[in-house]
């Protein structure tokens, strides 16, 4: 699959629409979070252009830099998620005719599920950071771009919640109870942070 970072929007959407397992919801969540990051970057940049020496310039600069980095990171996560899910599907297709084959398949599925849960968890964590920056810039950036920040918060929330769903979908396939618990706990903590930055009414 061509990397999302190298695709046009139309090409990526065509890949998403294709009747293939990947890219899927986890990849789409990362791209949605990337759009939220881009909006935060835009608003911060507009605000700095308007008042480069304003009282909130340092905060705007920090948010812009973090959003720019997040944009790149999230496109990588979109690719990573598709690769992780492809590996999970391949593990499910392993033979299971003998006890040895079943054991090998179980181990492979569990390992693939761990990776397939880790990537959307990373997406959730970055989406939460974006939502926090969008919230922090509210009333501290160009007033005419306030609606763009609101869109960023909503995209970040939707992306983060969607990524969390993908984490949870993979947990039952992970054999190690400690790993399952760790991923679940980190997901719950990130969701709590996300809800504070972008509550359901946002």
Image: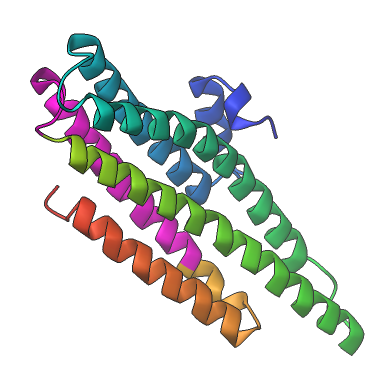
Name the residue at 50% across, 39% down: 74
Q: Residue at x 30, y 30 (%)?
A: 40
Residue 154 among magenta residues: yes
Give the residues drawn in magenta, as a range: 139-167
Please state the horizontal and vertical placement of residue 151, each as a whole percent of the image: 22, 34
Is residue 34 shown left or right of residue 92?
left
Tell which of 129 and 111 is nearer to you: 129
| Residue 8 visible in this rendered orientation of the protein | yes
Q: Is residue 70 rendered to the left or right of residue 143?
A: right
- The number of numbered discs placed on residues in the rendered structure image is 0
Q: Is residue 35 visible?
A: no
- In the picture, the quarter occupied by the N terminus is top right
Considering every residue shown, the one lying at the far top of the view is 50
Residue 32 placement, left or right of 88: left
In the rendered view, does 11 fall on the left or right side of 89? left
Q: How is the image coloured?
A: rainbow
Q: Quadrant of residue 98?
A: bottom right
Task: Say which residue appears at 77% left-offset and 77% top-offset.
Answer: 107
Above or below, 195 against 15 in this view is below
Q: Is residue 196 magenta?
A: no
Viewer-closest of 189 and 56: 56
| Rendered residue at 9%/33% (across/down) | 139
Q: Main secondary structure of the magenta part?
A: helix
Residue 71 position, x and y percent, is 46, 32
Q: Position of residue 8 (x, y in %)?
A: 54, 19
Compared with 180, 166 (above or below) is above
Determine which quarter of the picture holds residue 32: top left
Position above or below: 119 against 192: above
Residue 193 in percent (x, y) is at 29, 60
């Amino acid at each position: 699959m061509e990397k999302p970072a190298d695709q046009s929007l139309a090409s990526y959407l065509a890949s998403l629409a294709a009747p293939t397992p990947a890219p899927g919801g986890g990849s789409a969540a990362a791209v949605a979070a990337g759009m939220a990051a881009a909006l935060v970057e835009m608003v911060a940049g507009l605000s700095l252009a308007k008042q480069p020496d304003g009282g909130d310039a340092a905060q705007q600069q920090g948010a812009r830099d973090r959003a720019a980095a997040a944009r790149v990171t999230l496109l990588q996560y979109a690719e990573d998620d598709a690769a992780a899910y492809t590996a999970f599907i391949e593990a499910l297709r392993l033979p299971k005719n003998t006890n040895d084959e079943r054991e090998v398949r179980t181990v492979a599925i569990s390992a693939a599920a761990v990776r397939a849960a880790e990537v959307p968890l990373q997406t959730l964590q970055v989406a939460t950071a974006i939502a926090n920056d969008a919230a922090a810039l509210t009333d501290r950036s160009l007033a005419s771009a306030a609606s763009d920040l609101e869109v960023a918060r909503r995209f970040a929330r939707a992306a983060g919640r969607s990524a969390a769903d993908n984490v949870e979908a993979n947990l039952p396939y992970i054999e190690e109870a400690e790993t399952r618990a760790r991923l679940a706990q980190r997901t719950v903590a990130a969701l709590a942070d996300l809800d504070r930055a972008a509550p359901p009414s946002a």
